[in-house]
Image (cartoon, grey):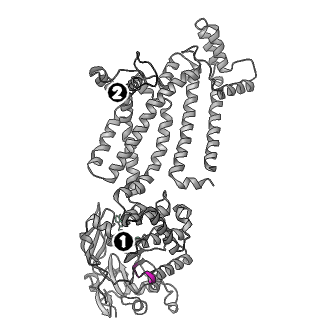
Amino acid sequence: MHYLLRRLGFYLLAAWAALTINFFLPRLMPGDPASTLFARFKGKLDPAAIEALRATFGLTDAPLWRQYLTSLGHVLQGDLGVSIAYFPSPVAEVIGTGLGWTLFLAGSAVIVSFAIGTLLGVVAAWWRRGWADSWLPSTLIFVGAFPYFWLAMAALYVLGFTLGWFPLGHAYSDDAVPGWTWAFTADVLRHAALPMTTIVLVTLGGWLLTMRNTMISLLGSDYVNLARAKGLPSAQVALRYAARNALLPSVTGFGMALGFVLGGSLLTEIVFSYPGQGYLLVQAVRAQDYPLMQGIFLVITLAVLGTNWLVDLIYLWLDPRTRDAGS
Amino acid sequence: MSAPLLSVRDLCVDYVTENGPVRAVDTVDLDLSPGEILGIAGESGCGKSTLAQALLRTLPPPAVIARGRVTFEGRDVLAMSEPELRGMRWRRMSMVFQSAMDALNPVTTIGEQLADTILAHEPVSGTEARRRAGALLERVGIPAERLGSYAHQLSGGMRQRVGIALALALEPALVILDEPTTALDVIVEREILAHIRTLQRTLGFAVIYITHDLARMLQFSDRVAIFYAARLVEVGPAATIATAPRHPYTRGLLRAFPRVHAEAGAAESIPGTPPSLRTPPPGCRFHPRCPIAVEACRRERPALLEVGPGHLAACPVAR
Ligand SMILES: Nc1ncnc2c1ncn2[C@@H]1O[C@H](COP(=O)(O)OP(=O)(O)O)[C@@H](O)[C@H]1O
Ligand SMILES: [Mg+2]
C-alpha cells in the first residue's frame, strides 16, 4: 500500500512537471510564436476565435505567476482551451473522441498482440527446437522487419481495395448510426479489423521473443528444476513455475507499449484514416492548431504516467516481492 | 546386508559441449542399503551434483547419461518412461537441491509449493494437502502459520528447512542432500544436520549426503565415498575412512580439514588444483598432485579394489 502511494506521489509530481513545461514552453520559444500566430490568423479567424486562443495560452496582461495558476486551474477542470482546426469545439472534446478511438483500436491491438505473443512465447520456449519454435519467431521477425507503412499500405491495397473485403478507412461507415446496437458494433469492428491486424502482426514477434527468451533462461532455474523433480505435471511446471515468473519482464514492456500507443498509432491512423489521437495530431500540425497540439501532448504524457501506474498495480499483484519492498 | 535400495553400475554422464563431450561422472559404481546414510565428498566441480541429478533423472541438457545402469527398488531407472519417472520422483526418491535457497518459486507461497507436491501424487483434497503441508513445516521446526509466506520473507536457514520439508513431503525411501548447508552459517548448519539425523532415525529413509566438507560428513554418515575428477577413488565405512584412509587424496582431504584429527596440527591443503574435466590427466587423475605417485600412475587407471572389509580404494601404491 505504502509502495503504491509513493508511486502515485511520484506520478503526480511528474504530471505536474509536464503541465508546467506545457505552460512555459510556448513562452520560452524565440520570437513569441503566439503573437506571430495571432498575426497570421488575423482576418482569417473571427475575433471570438482569437480571444479563445489568447485565453488558451493565458496571454493576458496578468503577471506570469497568475497566468500560470489560471492555466493550471483550467487544466484541472478539464479545460484545455478551444481548438482552431475544429473551431469552436473545445480541445478537450476533440481529444476525447480521438482518445476513445485510439483506446479502442491501438489499445485492443496491443492487448491482443501481448496476449497472443506471450502465449506463443511460452509454447516456443517449452517445446524448444520443436516445430513452433523453429518457424514462428523467424516468420514473425520477418514480418516485423517490413516498414510498417509499406505493410499497412499493401494490406489496405490488396485486402481493402482489390479484394474489397475490408472498408478503406474511417472508424465506421458514413451511413451508420452511432449507438450501442449490434449493427453499429459490427460496423466498427469491421473497420477496425484491418488496422488492428497490421499492428498485431508487426508487434507479435517482439512479445514472442521477449517471453521465449526469459522463459528459456528460467527453465534452467533451480525452482523450475525442483518443480520437475517433484514430479509435477508438465503443464503446472510450465505455467505456474516458469511462465508465471517469465511474465514479469514482459509486463513492464506491456505497460510501456500501452503508454506509447495511447499517443496514437500515427502511421496506422494515417494509412487507414482512422480518427484517433495520431490522426488528430497530424490535423493539428497541418492547421497549426497549437491548443490542440498542446492538449494532445498533455494527454500523451498523462496516458504514459497512468499506464505506468496501472503496471505498478499489476506488478504488485504478480510479484509478492514488490509488496514487501515498500515497507 | 539386505538387498540394496539403490545400485549404480558403470555410470557415465557427459556434458555435450561445442568442444566435445566433458565426462562429469566416469564409470561410477555405488550401492546403498535401505535406511543407510552414504556421504559423497569431493572438491567443487568434480561431478557430485551431476551424479545426484542423474539418479533422479533430472539432468538438464546438455548433460546426457552416456552409459551405465541405475537400479532403484529393483527397477531400472534409466529405462523408465516419463510417467514412470513422475511416479518415482519425490514419492520414492527426493532431493534437497544444492541451492535450496533459490529452489523455491518466488511468486507463490511455500504452502502452495508444499501442497502442489502432495496433490500431484496423492488423491487428497486441497484442504487435506494444506493441513499436511502445515504438519511438514512443523516437522522441520517452522510454525505452520508460515504456510502463507513467500520465499523472500524467510531467512536462508528457514528456506533450507522448507527444502527439507519438501523432500520429506511424500515420505520417500531415499533423500539426496546436495550440499544442503553450504549457504548457511555454522550454527544453523549444525542445527539442520542434527534435525535431518533425528528425522532420518524416526522415518527410516536412506540418505545420500553430498558435501565438500569431509570432516562434517564423517560425523554424519555411515559410509563414505570419495570423488575425484569424476571418479570414485575410495569407498568405505565412515569410521574406517576417518581413522585409516587409504587413498592419498583422502588423506590429503583429511589433513585439509583437521577438525577430525585435531592432534594432526594446522590445516594443510593439497598442493595443486583439481584437473579440468575437459582435459583430465591420463592414468590416475590424482597423480600430478600425489606425493607418492610412481611411473605407472601416469599411464594406468588404477582399479577400485577391496582393501579391507567393505573398504575399496583406487590406489595400488599406498599401504
Ligand atoms: N551445463 C554444463 N555444461 C558443461 N559442463 C558442465 C555443466 N554443468 C557442469 N559441467 C561440468 O561438470 C562438472 C561437474 O559439475 P557438478 O556436478 O556441478 O560438480 P559438483 O557438484 O561436484 O561441484 C563441472 O566441473 C563442469 O566441468
Ligand atoms: Mg554441486
Q: Which residue is mark 2?
A: A150
Amino acid tagged 2: Trp
Q: Is residue B65 left or right of residue A188?
A: left
Residue B237 sits above or below residue B280 on the image: below
Label drawn at residue B91: 1
Instruction: Name the residue nearer the viewer: A221 or A313.
Output: A313
Taking the magenta stretch, the answer to whether it contains residue A216 is no
Q: Chain of mark 1?
A: B
Question: Which residue is at the front of the view, A21 or B145?
Answer: B145
Residue drawn at x 47%, y 86% as measured from the top left: B219
Q: Position of residue B247 (x, y in %)?
A: 36, 87
Q: Position of residue B91 (x, y in %)?
A: 36, 71
Expressed as whole percent of the image width and height from the top left, the position of residue B42 reads 40, 78
Q: Is mark 2 within 8 Å of ligand 1?
A: no
- The quadrant holding residue A273 is top left
Coordinates of residue A316 in the picture (x, y in percent)? 54, 49
Q: Quadrant of residue A25?
A: top right
Q: Which mark is residue A188?
A: none
Q: Quadrant of ligand 2?
A: bottom left
The image shows residue A277, relative to residue B187, as above or below, that is: above
Q: Which amino acid, by three-letter code, is at mark 1?
A: Arg
Q: Nearer the viewer, residue B298 or B75?
A: B75
Q: Is the CB of mark 1 within 8 Å of ligand 2? A: no
Q: Residues within 10 Å of mark 1 (few under 14, many from 20)?
A: many
Q: Give the quarter of the image for residue A164.
A: top left
Q: Which residues are magenta?
A: B201-208
Quadrant showing the C terminus of chain A: bottom right
